[in-house]
């Protein structure tokens, strides 16, 4: 029930903001709404209210799939929906408050890529190799808090690296790709650690269920380790694709801006024919671009 309330509240707020924009004459691409509502909230429903939600207290492998969805899939698609951009456009006053928060020093520190990746990688290790995991099975309150806690690191991670919404600091995409690679390796290490663990995780709890069907407790943990490894790496594919697409779009926008700046620096003169024959050497375009002037200052003369 708590998750259903969250899904309905977030979906209603998002669609209300998109509708307000359309009524004011501004367009809001349908693919963003599909990513947020269909991808992000849909994955949250799948993780908690489908067969995964029914058997997450019974099968280790099912809970492992739920963990991957909450940690990676739900945050990825919620981020692609650009909720902060929508908030700033639909409710400008709230958007200005968010901008002030993002401009703070604390926001820049908390969203440093190495820190967000570290938290995202360490969180599932803490879940599976401490009493936290079994506590989430035994207590409904701890279970709900665990689901919420698992989603937060992924939200911050994808938000700061994809940069589709305003961020405290925009890091180069090369940094994003390296950090993403570390995260993918962390998922693989987690899955292998669960596979190789000689001890049963929450073994007393699963044995007490006396489940007469399905794989044994040991086999179920092995399957769950494979789910954490393989499914976690599969999720990295659309993330890398989204990063590359966003990088290419920014390169295209930057190229348009550079062309506009160069056109402004060399306006055409009416009636003047193009120069013919030898004449004074013209300055290369990159030496007049303020972003590159310092690099080539010492190379001329």
Image (cartoon, rainbow, N blue to C red):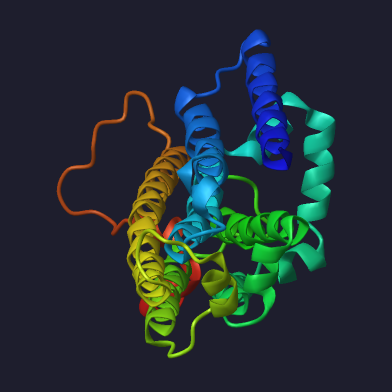
97 or 276, which is in the foreground?
97
Estimate the x, y position of residue 231 in percent, counting from the top left.
Answer: 36, 60
- Quadrant of residue 129 within the rendered picture: bottom right
Estimate the x, y position of residue 65 in percent, counting from the top left.
Answer: 44, 58
Estimate the x, y position of residue 98 in percent, counting from the top left.
Answer: 79, 45
- Tell me, yes or no, if residue 106 can be seen here: yes
Residue at 49% x, 53% y: name it: 69
Q: Is residue 64 positioned above or below 144 on the image?
A: below
Residue at 31% x, 30% y: name it: 272
Q: Quadrant of the N terminus?
A: top right
Q: Quadrant of the C terminus?
A: bottom left
- Tell me, yes or no, if residue 301 can be seen here: no
Q: Residue furthest bottom?
A: 198
- Quadrant of residue 111 within the rendered picture: bottom right
Q: Is residue 47 positioned above or below 171 on the image?
A: above
186 or 267, which is in the foreground?
186
Task: Please give left or right for residue 95 compared with residue 113 in the image.
Answer: right
Estimate the x, y position of residue 279 in percent, counting from the top left.
Answer: 24, 54
The mark tally for this picture is 0
Task: Please give left or right for residue 36 compared with residue 217 in the image.
Answer: right
Task: Please give left or right for residue 4 compared with residue 195 in the image.
Answer: right
Residue at 64% x, 82% y: name it: 130
Q: Residue furthest left?
A: 277
């Amino acid at each position: 029930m708590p998750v259903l309330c969250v899904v309905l509240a977030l979906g209603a707020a998002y669609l209300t903001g998109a509708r307000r924009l359309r009524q004011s004459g501004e367009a809001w691409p349908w693919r963003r709404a599909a990513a947020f509502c269909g991808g992000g909230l849909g994955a949250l429903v799948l993780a908690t209210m489908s067969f995964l939600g029914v058997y997450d207290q019974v099968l280790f492998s099912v809970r492992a799939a739920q963990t991957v969805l909450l940690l990676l899939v739900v945050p990825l698609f919620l981020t692609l929906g650009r909720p902060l951009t929508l908030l700033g456009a639909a409710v400008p006053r709230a958007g200005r408050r968010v901008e002030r928060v993002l401009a703070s020093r604390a926001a820049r520190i908390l969203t440093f890529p190495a820190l967000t990746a570290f938290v995202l990688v360490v969180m599932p290790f803490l879940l599976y190799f401490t009493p936290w995991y079994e506590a989430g099975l035994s207590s409904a309150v701890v279970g709900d808090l665990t689901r919420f806690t698992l989603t937060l690191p992924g939200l911050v991670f994808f938000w700061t690296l994809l940069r589709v919404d305003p961020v405290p600091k925009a890091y180069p995409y090369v940094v994003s790709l390296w950090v993403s690679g570390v995260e993918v390796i962390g998922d693989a290490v987690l899955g292998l650690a669960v596979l190789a663990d000689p001890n049963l995780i929450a073994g007393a709890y699963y044995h007490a269920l006396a489940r007469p069907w399905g794989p044994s407790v040991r086999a179920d943990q092995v399957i769950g380790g494979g789910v954490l490894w393989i499914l976690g790496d599969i999720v990295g594919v659309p993330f890398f694709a989204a990063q590359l697409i966003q990088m290419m779009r920014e390169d295209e926008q930057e190229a348009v801006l550079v062309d506009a700046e160069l056109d402004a620096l060399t306006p055409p003169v009416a009636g003047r024919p193009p120069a013919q024959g030898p004449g004074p050497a013209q300055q290369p375009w990159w030496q007049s671009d303020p972003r590159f002037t310092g690099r080539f200052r010492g190379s001329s003369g």
